[in-house]
């Protein structure tokens, strides 16, 4: 087993040094957390599913010309990605009121929004990722106004793509979160979609039944998270059933 240098460990993923300059290996763990890690569990097979699903969505975005960090999948739990400088924002797009928006505004979950709404949270676990206005982002130098305009355009393209793909398999895309990174190509800075796109970072409701097929199943104790994610993968034709229980490769640090 190759020795890999661990660079960062988050709640759901680990980043290792990649084989070439400008690359990283992203490893998907089975760990699930919610409410800023107050609630934790290990969900057998989640990492395998999210690795495949993120590959599927990022590959689709590449085909549409939306630049992102995905290079190739390496194995059941790992993918090769472009190294980038993550902008410390959670970029959230909402089509339907749910979660923190529904709570904050006293709206009933499921209320359609008049148009997609893009909002930003500052990525800081100690502060609980607070919602921030664009003015803060520019004033504190996390991103320029031009970056923000570009980020909103990227987020809306991802929303159109993901909404369409999901609609095609009978799933409503309620909301999702992406992260954006910077890469430099010669003197040119490019913004790319980074992190992951998976049912951990989206709200997905079955159009017919309203059944939740995303991490709310874990957050709200609604049943088996693996079954929910497997159903999303099955509908998208992303992976055959039965492979989620593959053993984890042993990684020596
Ligand atoms: P929220 O309604 O809790 O603010 O979540 C909005 C979207 O962002 C939802 O699709 C879930 C996703 N999300 C994450 O990916 N990570 C997080 O830490 C949180 C709180 C939400």
Image (tube, rainbow, N blue to C red):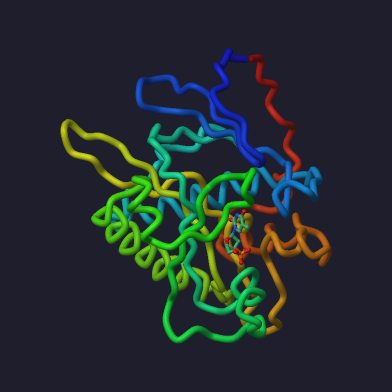
Determine whether, in the image, residue 230 is placed left or right of residue 91.
right
Q: Where is residue 116 in the image (x, y as percent from the top left)?
A: 43, 76
Considering only vertical position in the picture, is 226 above or below 47? below
Q: Viewer-proximal residue, 231 or 173? A: 173
Looking at the image, which residue is at 36% across and 60% down?
A: 135
Residue at (66% x, 20% y) in the render: 251
Quadrant in which residue 48 is drawn: top right
Residue at position x 57%, y 14% from top? Answer: 2
Q: Which of 176 and 208 is in front in this view?
A: 176
User: In this picture, is 53 found above or below 83?
Assistant: below
**Residue closer to the observer: 161 or 132:** 132
Left or right: where does residue 134 sit relative to residue 91? left
Q: Position of residue 87 (x, y in %)?
A: 41, 44
Looking at the image, residue 196 sits to the left or right of residue 61; the answer is: right
Answer with the quarter of the image where residue 248 lies: top right
- In what quadrant of the picture does the N terminus appear? top right
Q: In which quarter of the image is ligand 1?
A: bottom right
Residue at image point 55% right, 16% down: 5
Residue 146: give x, y in percent of width and height: 24, 55
Return the x and y of residue 68 as percentages of the image width and height.
37, 46
Left or right of residue 31, residue 172 in this image: left
Farthest residue, direction left: 187
């Amino acid at each position: 087993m190759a020795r890999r240098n661990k660079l960062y460990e988050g709640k759901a993923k680990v980043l290792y040094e990649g084989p070439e300059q400008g690359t990283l290996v992203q490893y998907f763990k089975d760990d699930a957390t919610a409410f800023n890690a107050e609630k934790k569990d290990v969900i057998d097979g989640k990492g395998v599913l999210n690795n495949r699903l993120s590959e599927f969505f990022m590959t689709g975005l590449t085909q549409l010309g939306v630049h992102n960090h995905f290079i190739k999948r390496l194995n059941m739990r790992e993918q090769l990605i472009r190294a980038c400088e993550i902008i410390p924002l959670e970029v959230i797009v909402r089509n339907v009121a749910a979660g923190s928006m529904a709570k904050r505004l006293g709206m009933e979950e499921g209320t359609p929004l008049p148009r997609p709404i893009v909002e930003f949270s500052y990525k800081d676990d100690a502060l609980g990722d607070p919602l921030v206005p664009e003015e803060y982002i520019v004033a504190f130098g996390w991103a320029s106004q031009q970056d923000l305009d570009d980020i909103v355009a990227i987020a809306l393209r991802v929303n159109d793509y993901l909404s369409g793909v999901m609609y095609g398999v009978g799933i409503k895309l309620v909301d999702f979160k992406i992260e954006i990174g910077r890469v430099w190509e010669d003197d040119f800075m490019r913004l790319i979609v980074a992190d992951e796109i998976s049912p951990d970072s989206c709200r997905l409701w079955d159009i017919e039944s309203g059944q939740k097929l995303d991490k709310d199943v874990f957050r709200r104790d609604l049943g088996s998270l693996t079954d929910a994610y497997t159903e999303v993968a099955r509908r998208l034709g992303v992976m055959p059933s039965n492979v989620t229980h593959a053993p984890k490769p042993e990684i020596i640090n």
